Image (cartoon, rainbow, N blue to C red):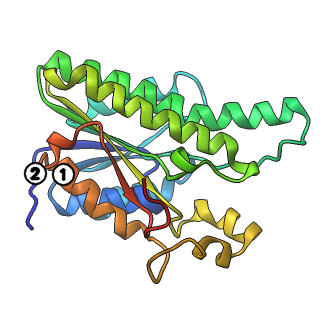
Amino acid sequence: MYINLSGLNILVTGASKGIGKAIATKLAEAGATIGVHYNESTREAESLASIIGNQSRAFQADLSKEEEASKLFERVSLEMGSLEILINNAGVAIPTKMDVPEKDWLEKWNTTMMVNLTSAAVLSKKAVEHFIKRRAAGRIINIASRAAFRGDKEEYIAYAASKAGLISLTQSIARNFGDQGIKAFSIAPGFVRTELAQEFIKQFGEEEVKGDLALERMTEAKDIAPLVTFIASGMADHATGSTFDVNAGSYMH
């Protein structure tokens, strides 16, 4: 199936590596112009923007800090002229056991929530306002996790909770703004072979990760990008509010 996204400006957060990089690359192959968000990986982000072309460009923001998400959206929409699609992909998974001092535990919890949920909520708010002001259709695609539905190990409680919040955010946007042309979707991967998953694999072993899989291998970033591109095309608009599971059959609901 040929998908043409020419003329669409898309912001992908956490796009310098992993799932975000695969998504940005696939969207650009379909003709879209990408705002490649990154935090610290300047060289990787700028290189990616150059390679994928279509006048794509890199934008830096530390989404663990208040006001950074809002400033990011304003820069992107100003420099790119408009924004048709927002993809909230940036995320952190900070392992923290429950028996650590409460101050330390809460610090990790707050950082996780800020990056994974609060920044996505702010960017979504800005996107909704942007779409309505322009009286144009728009799409928001949130990269959640199967952990939103089945929970996670003790060390990753904050991660699971943040992703559950992201699912609810998606559903609420879809319910409230669909009649104004705004659609919202979630994608819930299981383990994906990226740097983010390496800490878990290092701690618990690859067999722990592969034990739940129905397929012969772990999901890779390239397995998620085509689905995002399909949703971005508008051909799945009547699935607004839905969550698409991409987890190699490791969790079904």
Marks 2 and 1, the one that precedes in the sequence: 2
Q: Secondary structure at mark 1?
A: loop
Q: Residue at x 41, y 29 (%)?
A: 169
Mark 1 highlights which residue?
A: 32
What's the amino acid at mark 1? Ala
Can you tell which quarter of the image residue 222 is in?
Answer: bottom left
Residue 16, image x, y percentages: 45, 56
Where does the image place residue 220, in percent across and percent down from the top left? Answer: 44, 71
Give the spatial CA distance, label 2 vs label 1: 5 Å
Q: Is residue 50 visible?
A: no
Image position, residue 168 (x, y; %)? 43, 31
Residue 45, relative to residue 110: is it above or below?
A: below
Tell me if mark 1 has few (under 14), some (14-19) or many (20+) residues whose alpha carbon lies within 10 angstroms of its own.
many
Q: Which mark is residue 6?
A: 2
Q: Identify the residue at image location x=44%, y=27%.
A: 121
Q: Residue furthest bottom?
A: 216
Q: Quadrant of the N terminus?
A: bottom left
User: Along the line of sight, which residue is nearer the eye, 85 or 246?
Assistant: 246
Q: Secondary structure at mark 2?
A: loop
Q: Residue furthest front?
A: 253
Q: Nearer the viewer, residue 72 or 134?
A: 134
Q: Is residue 163 above or below residue 192?
A: above
Q: Position of residue 248 (x, y in %)?
A: 43, 70
Which quadrant would residue 242 be assigned to in this image? top left
Instruction: Give the amino acid type for the residue marked by disc 2 in the picture.
Output: Ser
Q: Is residue 144 left or right of residue 6?
A: right
Residue 101 in view (yes/no): yes
- Residue 94 circle label: none
Residue displayed at 60% across by 28% down = 65
Q: Are marks 2 and 1 in contact (CB under 8 Å)?
A: yes
139 up-or-down from 58: above or below? above
